[in-house]
Amino acid sequence: MSITGWQRESSKESEATAAAVCAETPVEIPTVTALTERSVLSARRWFVTMLTLAGISLLVITASLRFGAEEIGFSDSARILLEAFRYGATRIDLLGPSSVILLQVRLPRVLLAFMVGSSLAAVGVALQALLRNPLADPYVLGISSGAALGAALAMLFGIGTTVLAISTLPLWAFVGGLMAIVIVYRVAASYGRLPVHTLLLAGVILNAIFSALIMFITSIMDPNRSFSTMFWLMGALTAPNYPTMVVLVLYLVVGGSILLWQSQSLNLLTLGEEPARSLGVEVEAVKKTIFFTSALLTGAVVSVSGLIGFVGMVIPHAVRMVIGADHRLLLPASALVGGTFLVAADTVARTVLAPAEIPVGIVTALGGGPLFIYLLLYRKSGLAV
């Protein structure tokens, strides 16, 4: 199915969604599966899908806690988690070295990977709907690079090493990401529409400019800080402390809630701006909200994980093919799948060459890069619009 075909399919699904909302009846949505079956988006289907994906996510997270430089069995993991829940952090050291590894290193890292993957996938869904382009992604469009530039500037000025770094570093990354997404949109919209090649070209140019600026900042840093910054830029999930995770959760909850709140507007926007406007959508307000929220979420995750590419493009595309394009289900489902995917990728990154680690950004790029090339080559007729 070409990208033009994907847009027509999304438009048909959005028309069905809009009609059902007006009539307050269940929505019949065609899924893009091998059997091309039709299914009804009811409350039951929504909950069954989400519970199934949540169960899979829990299994993957539980399994990932076992693997690492030192394996910890399922029974030991369950015992340590139960003891930590019963007695709190004061008893961690008394439970043995395995408990320290599990509770202070492995568990925070796994939770961080899940949150980062969920956020990137959710942002990818929103941008693809807003731009009506299945190749839209915070990494490809240069938003992640802009956020990384903002975070690198904060590190250069010493903000990342201060007590306030927990709350201010994501804000610097947010400003950089917002700047990038505004530039990309303005460049593409100057043609009167949003052609795919213009979006990709603008993203490539911004990535090149921001990468050069980041390299300059890194070159004038202290050598020790420069090395850690370079490793972070490759996409590194290091175990954060729990206060940092609490602040990150606040960013993600706020951003994710805003995107979910806009899910019906995203359904209508897949019809095009004029049809959506005629159906009562305040298009410009929705654009600003999505851009602002995308920059917020991207900045928050880049500030703690560095540049992790292609999650926001590959996951929404795959989930859409299975469950359809209704964003009331697609957005939360993609978030769960994206989190699960990045947990699995990070497990591979820290175990394949253990005790050495591969930056998880390399793993996702090796998986997502070939798919990106496939979409460009196999669907080049759809890209010519």
Image (cartoon, grey):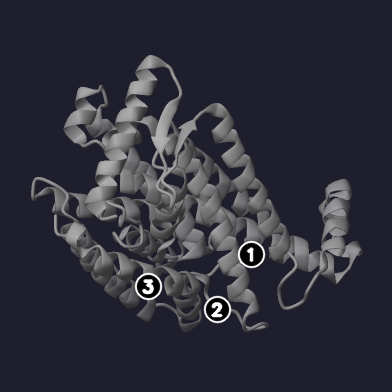
Q: Residue at x 41, y 77 (%)?
A: 221
Which badge, 3 or 1, is on the more N-terminal residue? 1
**Vertical side of 55 occupied by 104: above or below:** below
**Vertical side of 230 occupied by 74: above or below:** above
Quadrant where the C terminus is found in the figure: bottom left
Checking the image for residue 358, the label placed there is 2
Quadrant where the N terminus is found in the figure: bottom left
Q: Amino acid at mark 3?
A: Pro
Checking the image for residue 58, the label placed there is none
Report how far apart the C-alphas of labels 3 and 1 lie in the structure.
29 Å
What kind of element bears circle 1? loop
Report how far apart the C-alphas of labels 3 and 2 lie in the structure.
19 Å
Q: Quadrant of residue 49?
A: top right
Label 3 or label 1, whichever lies nearer to me, is: 3
What kind of element bears circle 2? loop
Q: Residue at x 17, y 31 (%)?
A: 274
Q: Quadrant of residue 242?
A: bottom right
Which badge, 2 or 1, is on the more N-terminal residue? 1
Which badge, 3 or 2, is on the more N-terminal residue? 2
Does any portion of residue 168 appear in the rendered image?
A: no
Q: Foreground residue, 119 or 206?
A: 119
Q: Amino acid at mark 1?
A: Ala
**Vertical side of 34 occupied by 270: above or below:** above
Q: Amino acid at mark 2?
A: Ile
Q: Foreground residue, 138 or 7?
A: 7
Q: Which residue is mark 1?
A: 239
Q: Residue at x 34, y 72 (%)?
A: 214
Report how far apart the C-alphas of labels 2 and 1 lie in the structure.
15 Å
Report crowding for label 2: few under 14, some 14 to 19, many 20 or more residues within 10 A (C-alpha): some
